[in-house]
Image: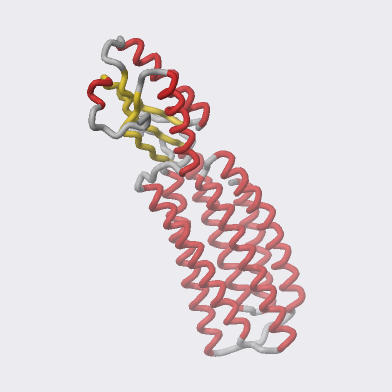
Amino acid sequence: MLLSLAAAITTMALKGVAAAITGSVGLLSDALESGVNLAAAAIGLIAVRTAAKPPDREHQFGHGKAEYLSAGVEGGMIFTAAALIVWSAVSRLIEPQPIDQTGLGLALSAIAALINLAVGMALVKVGRDKRSLAVEADGRHLLTDVWTSVGVLVGVGLMFVTDLEILDPLIALLVGVNVLIAGYRLLRRSVVGLLDAALPADDAGKVLAVLRAHCEAERVEFGAIRTRESGRQRFIYLTMFVPGEWSVRQSHELADVIEAEIATELPGSMSFTHVEPLEDATGIRSLCR
């Protein structure tokens, strides 16, 4: 996230200079998006540090949802940037203006795009590996910014070749729409996470595979299986039905083994197992049947 912060400062400066020397509203829109990147990187850094804190008395399930809040704030900021971009584009559509020093401006913007490409790819990889929504979201935002920059570069280049001044504000409008889509996706993912979404199908499948293996090995059944994720944290809740003659110790020893196996398949996850007598499983939907 510190790398993202440094990249945002650098690219915002490069694109700001490019917009200033050319007077292009398309390049200005690109610079505004980089300004959002800077604020988002700062918020993301705070969120990642908060989410990494261990559980405490007031937050007994950890602080993982801080990353969803970060993504939500970033999405809202993206919408603000999009509104500024569209406003600038409409103003320039009404009064088209020529641009200056196109070559230098495009070169500076291209350098900024390459920086964002490298940093964005690195952030997405780290975010996936560490299961950090804030880091991955920031990386995807930077990659979206790269495509925005490519579109601006092509459009401003065409304007330079064709002398069609209207292309500049039209490019800015397209950038604004692209930014709006990126903001919507971030907000949607943030809301889904805050609403305690279930684990993705692949992760849930690993949990079920562990449980099915014990259906065959022991005389037990499983039901009421629920999952949720909170940032990098994953929680699994299940009921294990064991033979009535089993002791409490025997039941909980098996529960401990199963929870350890789930944690091996899903590192960082936490499982909660409720034990019931097998005789009470009648009429309950069981994973083992």
Q: Which x, y percent locates residue 16?
A: 64, 68
Q: Residue at x 40, y 28 (%)?
A: 271
Q: Would you place residue 106 above or below residue 216 in this image?
A: below
Q: Going 48% across and 62% down the picture, which residue do you hit?
A: 183
Whether residue 237 sits left or right of residue 38 in the image: it is left
From the viewer's perspective, is residue 270 above or below residue 121?
above
Would residue 177 be found to the left or right of residue 165 on screen?
left
Say which of 112 and 18 sits in front: 112
Is 188 drawn above or below residue 204 in the view shown?
Answer: below
Residue 272, picture quadrant: top left
133 versus 52 height, above or below: below
Q: Percent from the top left, x then y, of residue 206?
A: 49, 34
- Residue 60 visible in this rendered orientation of the protein: no
Horizontal and vertical percent position of residue 67: 46, 45
- Quadrant assignment, res 108: bottom right
Closer to us: 76 or 207: 207
Which of the image's four quarters has the C terminus?
A: top left
